Amino acid sequence: MEPRPIESLPDLELLRRFAKGDTAALGELASRYERCLLGVARGILQDRTLACDAVQETWLRVIRHAKGFDGRSSVKTWLYRILVNRAIDMRARRSVIPLNEGEAPPTVPLPRDDEQAGRLAEAMAELPDASRVVLLLCHHRGLTHEQAAEVLDIPVGTLKSRSFAAMRQLRAALGVVEEEARS
């Protein structure tokens, strides 16, 4: 039987292979998750350079701790948890990080024009960190409520409540009337 190509291996197998010294396995994990991690980091930090630093720190932690991964969570949620913790720590070390000129963090939903994109970026920037992270994970990155709750290490019910409240805050910041939001 021929070995499966590295691209078809599940995340857990890739992490296990990397822990045993297969650097190509880490490269495959990075190709699967790098853009997603960067998008979440940009949404939290609102700065591309800092987001790249957070992603780099995430991969360094993965490299250091791959052998200790116990499989209680999926590799995907483990990566997101590391990234979210890194980004929040970085944000806390800096008081307020302004948006770069003309740069909007990746947000939800996708705007229809530049004016809407600007309003959405401003509204997302005004949200508390916890609200913004929930929206980024659930609506921008498409994690399930269960996966996002695992990343944030909170109960699913708490995650759902935060998601509902965060969407309500975002709608209010954008001036969307509740009846409009339901249609």
Image: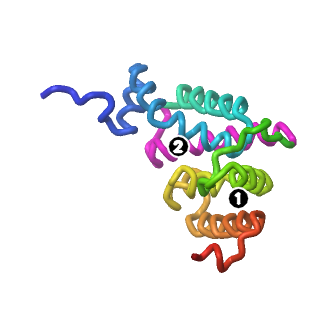
Q: Pick the residue in front: 28 or 19.
A: 28
* Residue 25 at x, y percent in the picture: 39, 26
Looking at the image, is mark 2 or mark 1 nearer the viewer?
1
Left or right, 70 with reference to 166: left
- The kind of residue on which mark 1 rests is Ser
**Image coordinates for residue 154, horizontal then vertical, percent:** 61, 59
Is the residue 82 above or below the residue 116 in the image? above
Q: Which residue is mark 2?
A: 78
Please state the extent of the stretch shown in magenta in the rendering.
Answer: 67-95
- The dominant secondary structure in magenta is helix
The quadrant in which residue 127 appears is: bottom right
Asked whether 161 or 61 is in front, the reply is 161
Is residue 152 visible from the viewing direction of this image? no
Q: In the image, what residue type sits under mark 2?
A: Trp
**Could you say whether the residue bearing mark 2 is in a helix, strand or loop?**
helix
State whether residue 111 is above or below residue 84.
below
Per the model, the C-alpha gap separating discs 2 and 1 is 20 Å
Q: Which scheme is used to colour this image of the protein?
A: rainbow
Q: Is residue 77 left or right of residue 135?
A: left
User: CB atoms at circles 2 and 1 under 8 Å apart?
Assistant: no
- Give the mark nearer the N terminus: 2 vs 1: 2
For the point 60% across and 41% down, which residue is it?
39
The quarter of the image holding the N terminus is top left
Mark 2 nearby-residue class (10 Å; few <14, some 14–19, many ≥20): some
Q: Residue at x 51, y 47 (%)?
A: 77
State the residue position of label 1.
Answer: 131
Q: Residues within 10 Å of mark 1 (few under 14, many from 20)?
A: many
Q: SS of the residue at dot 1?
A: helix
> Which quadrant holds the C terminus?
bottom right
Residue at x 57%, y 29% (from the top left corner):
59
